[in-house]
Amino acid sequence: MTTLSRRALLALTGAAGVAGAAHAAHAAPGAAAAASSPAASRVSSPAAASPATTARTAAPPVAAAGHDRGPVRTGFARLAESGYAALSGRRVGVVTNPTGITADGHHIVDVMHADDRVDLVAVFGPEHGFRGTAQAGSSEGPSRDPATGLPVYDVYGLRGRPLTDVFTAAGVDTVVFDIQDVGARFYTYIWTLYDCMEAAASAGLAVVVLDRPNPVGGRQACGPVLEPAYATFVGRAPIALCHGMTAGELAGLFRAEFLSGGPELDVVRMEGWRRDAFFDGTGLPWVPPSPNMPTPDTALVYPGTCLFEATNLSEGRGTTRPFELLGAEGVDRRWAAAADALGLPGVWVREAHFTPVFSKFKDRTVGGVRLLVHDREAYDPVLTGIGLLVTARRTWPGFAWRADRWIDRLTGSDRVRTLIDSGAEPAEVAADWQPGLARFRAVRARHLLYP
């Protein structure tokens, strides 16, 4: 087995990323807006916008919320500061979940509903639901929000005409998107955004994206790029597995590169966020974007270890450390030893034993590994995931891919699976996706909004 040095791995995965980050740092802040149609897509600086023309109400306690106190101020905070100028005269529906909060913990739906300057008429719930209670692959269904009385529409899995029909039934002319993403292509909220933009374009509706940080930073993109033949709801368009972008940046990229002809797009930018910032440097509160994403540490490892969802090993669901713990019955210490011997940058791999309370191996004790990231700057989650797959397959005779070849959907082609099955080393697998990744990085650079 070939052992990869830290220097060799960084040389393989880091050079293009450093160049991309340098490009981003020197790019004009409005580069993404310039790349798309100026007449139909713009990046807002709400503080400089004209005041809303509707009367300002006496602000109840919740309506006064939304002013970020940390170094990063979200798109919503800047929208609220402007008097909701971008929503003046609009009938608004919001796509959001429990992560749509202000810096002091109020939900944006409560804040906007309490303010007469916003005509908020509907809420749209994505995967896991508006309240975030549903597990992966499900949602909460339609309901009425008991706090505001607003109708909550379930849009999980809808696109095209069915989604347009929901927007029409809700009576909205503007769709606002405010959800905390985690930076991985197969995390479905960005594709809910994509589908909403597509449906809004066909219905003549406007889309407003209230931007939030990429919690794992935005220094570079990494991992394989989706091939269009493998497009699903865990990847609609050819972007890298770790895209290194915010939702607002992705919205600009989607519109310019993949959604010809619309919709009218307004991205309300953050203030104070930089591409080298991890979530714990933002000053913002963390709310789990989904039930198995409890901490920013989870988001850091997720792009690589979620690949185990496509195997017969547990990806740690049903434990307090999902995606940091991996294992199966019959796995012994040989896996941890083999994975740690790879010398993967920024992470230690240690032997672990755990008992999931739901999902794979429910109520059974399994053996496996736990990831300990000790250098976030050097860590490459996708390369780590590949190294773990390669060594799991070599050290555990029971290893198997899911019969539906879900791994191909997650990685974006059949290349990762076939290379691993052929006995390729992690570096060989990673080398295979570099040409496509280089092309994506060039496209991505045109749509970056932050230094």
Image: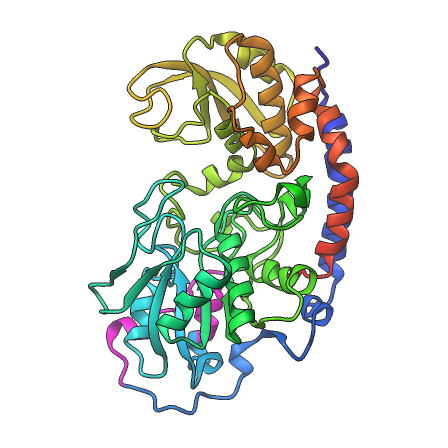
Q: Is residue 403 left or right of residue 89?
A: right
Q: Residue 409: horizontal and vertical position, in percent?
A: 58, 37
Q: Which image quarter: residue 136?
A: top left
Q: Residue 34: horizontal and vertical position, in percent?
A: 72, 71
Q: Which image quarter: residue 155?
A: bottom left
Point 49% across, 8% down: residue: 333
Pick the front one: 341 or 258: 258
Note whether residue 231 is visible: yes
Q: Is residue 95 above or below residue 371?
A: below
Q: Is residue 66 magenta?
A: yes
- Residue with the most extreme front position: 161
**Range of the magenta residues?**
58-79
Q: How many marks?
A: 0
Q: Residue 298: horizontal and vertical position, in percent?
A: 46, 37
The quarter of the image holding the C terminus is bottom right
Q: Is residue 398 left or right of residue 414?
A: left
Pick the front one: 243 or 312: 312
The quarter of the image holding the N terminus is top right
Point 49% across, 48% down: residue: 188
Q: Residue 131: horizontal and vertical position, in percent?
A: 30, 53
